[in-house]
Image (cartoon, helix red, strand yellow):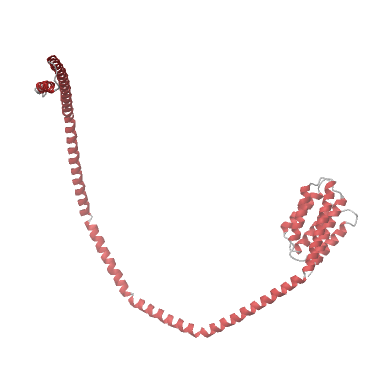
Amino acid sequence: MKKIPKFPNPLAGFLPCLLIMNITTAQQSAPVTSSERQANIMAAAAQMQAGAQQIQQNAQTAAQQFQAGAQQFQQNAQAAQAQFQAGAPQRQANAQAAAAQMQAGAQQFQQNAQAAQAQWQAGAPDRQAAAQQFYQDAQAALDQWQAGAPERQAAAQQFYQDAQLALAEWQAGAPERQAAAQAAGVQFQESVQTFQQDAQAALAQWQAGAPERQAAAAQFQTNMIDLGEDLMGIQADSTVTPEQVDSLKQSTYLVLTDVDNQPSTASVSALGMTVGMAYQDGAVSDQELDNIQASVVNVMLSAGVTQESIDAMNTSVDAIVSASGVDQEDIDLIVEDIQKIVIDLQTYLSP
């Protein structure tokens, strides 16, 4: 172990100077007795001795700490040197491995470059052949283009001539087109005037028929009220449900709103004959009721009612007629109400 050198104590010459300064200070103070001066000198000497001892202890403590730090530093340096020497073989092995890998990579790169060069040299004939073929194709295309030049020139001249003829024909037909445009304008103006006259006539006809339409609406409303009251009476004495009653009222209303024109006289007359024949014996059978419904269907179809609306009304009628508790009198009421509706259609929708 390296020996730590001893450093000189800087306080060695400082202590006598301190003693002399204390004695001189004591002598320059106010006049005192010799015994007091002796006491002061002894006190200063004791104080100086005590301070010297403390200084010496502090110096020894500092020297010990410095020596201990120097030893720790020497141990750390030795440990670092040992660790560095221990890692030297691994670093040397890593350096050798890196050098070997670099050398192998350089060899592989050289081999790849040589292979690429060989491949490029091997493909040179193909590239040369392709270049020659491209040159030959270009020459052939140029020859073909030059050979077709007269045809293209002739086609261009023909196109120019056709355009000139079309222009001349268009200019020659300009008066006819102008006359046709004028005639179309006159015809359009006449059509507008005719449409205006027809619209005015339709408006006048609509206004003239307003009282009849109001009377028809009032009569249809009365018929619907009568049908509703009769259905309510039938419901009270049978198993007919409120839903079935509402269904017949609604389907009948949809039929009336679906009417486009007056029903034919033949279909209304056929309905009257069917009802009359059904009541010859005083009772309406199921077959006779089916015949009446078929006649009603013919009347509604002739009035422009859709088949869907008609089927909905017939289904509602069948549901009520087939309910338990519905007697012949109830059926008569339903047939009478429907017949009144059909007759009013013919009466109030007459032209």
Identify the residue shown where x is 61% and y is 78%. 188
Q: Is 288 or 215 nearer to us in this picture?
A: 215
- Where residue 166 appears, as percent x and y from the top left, is 46, 81
- The image quadrant that residue 299 belongs to is bottom right
Q: Is 152 or 164 nearer to us in this picture?
A: 164
Q: The N terminus lies in which quarter of the figure?
A: top left
Residue at the far right in the pictured view = 281
Q: Is 81 or 173 nearer to us in this picture?
A: 81
- The image quadrant that residue 108 belongs to is top left
On screen, residue 149 versus residue 287, left or right, reads left
How many callouts does the rendering have? Answer: 0
Residue at the far top in the pictured view = 35
323 to 296, vertically: above or below: above
- Tell me if I can see residue 251 in this picture: yes
- The image quadrant that residue 297 belongs to is bottom right
106 to 209, vertically: above or below: above
Q: The C terminus lies in which quarter of the figure?
A: bottom right
Identify the residue shown where x is 66% and y is 78%. 193
17 to 160, vertically: above or below: above
Identify the residue shown where x is 82% and y is 48%. 235
On screen, residue 6 versus residue 214, left or right, reads left
- Where residue 308 appears, as percent x and y from the top left, is 72, 57
Q: Is 337 or 210 nearer to us in this picture?
A: 210
On screen, residue 244 versus residue 44, left or right, reads right
- Where residue 253 appears, as percent x and y from the top left, is 76, 57
- Where residue 119 appears, as percent x and y from the top left, is 22, 52
- Tell me if I can see residue 1 in this picture: no
